[in-house]
Amino acid sequence: MDVPIVQKILKANDDLAGDVRSLFEAHNLTAVNLMSSPGAGKTSLIEAALPLLTANLRVAVIEGDPETALDAERIAIHNVPVVQIETAGGCHLEAHLVKKALDQFDLNVLDLVLIENVGNLICPAEFDLGESYRVAVVSVPEGHDKPVKYPKVFRMADAIVLNKADLLPHVPFDTATFDESVTRLNPRAPVMRTSCMDNTGIDAWTAWLRSRIVREATI
Ligand code: MG
Ligand code: ZN
């Protein structure tokens, strides 16, 4: 693919992302795009937050995966509207896919849409989905060097989550180097340590999501 074609694809995506963003804004709706490598725990972080959020917020979830509806099936157990986007091997979500998924929801009765991107630390950073906020998730077994190797996702994030913190005593992960590198890459994003195994940091993660809500809670 030569450069002009890539630019054309990104421009078409940006235009559609603008439409999606307008749609969210028109409904006073917050949308959060979760990005990480495969297996960092995005679905688990959503599952951990849902029972706390849905006490007084109306949440819907869009799941992106190359194949299967396994993650949507996990989310559906929590009784929230969920749409699975199967990208048929595609390695990131694009705005037109999100726009289509939104047709399945009644945006008038939602406060928050959580969008779980395809597990990939590279191209999700290139494709605006019209989201209000972006979260970069990295897990302890991946190693402390991921932010410096894949800086773009971390630079553009509004929050950074270090998941699987319960594994810190068991694997070589230099927390000082990690903290220093993410702060250097992105001084404005809060960095939260979480574990969906022992619930470390789930309150802080949920509180951060809640603090992004535009609409007054109505239920
Ligand atoms: Mg997942
Ligand atoms: Zn991709």
Image: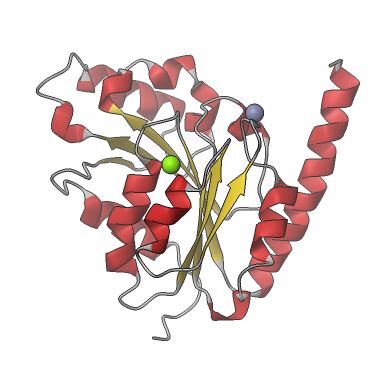
Q: How is the rendered protein coloured?
A: secondary structure
The x and y percentages for residue 111 are 49, 72
The x and y percentages for residue 181 are 36, 21
- At horizontal 17% and vertical 17% (from top left) the residue drawn is 171
The x and y percentages for residue 32 are 51, 53
Looking at the image, residue 43 lies above or below residue 92: below
- At horizontal 43% and vertical 16% (from top left) the residue drawn is 148
**In terms of depth relative to the viewer, which is nearer, 185 or 137?**
137
**In terms of depth relative to the viewer, which is nearer, 166 or 70?**
70
Looking at the image, residue 214 lies above or below residue 134: below
Give the quadrant of the C terminus.
Answer: bottom left
The x and y percentages for residue 35 are 49, 38
Q: What count of labels does the image hold?
A: 0
Residue placed furthest toward the left? 169
Give the quadrant of the N terminus.
Answer: top right
- At horizontal 39% and vertical 42% (from top left) the residue drawn is 42
8 on left or right of 109 = right
Ligand 2 is found in which quarter of the picture?
A: top right
Residue 14 figure quarter = top right
Looking at the image, residue 93 lies above or below residue 83: above
- At horizontal 65% and vertical 58% (from top left) the residue drawn is 101
Looking at the image, residue 92 lies above or below residue 150: below
Residue placed furthest toward the bottom? 218
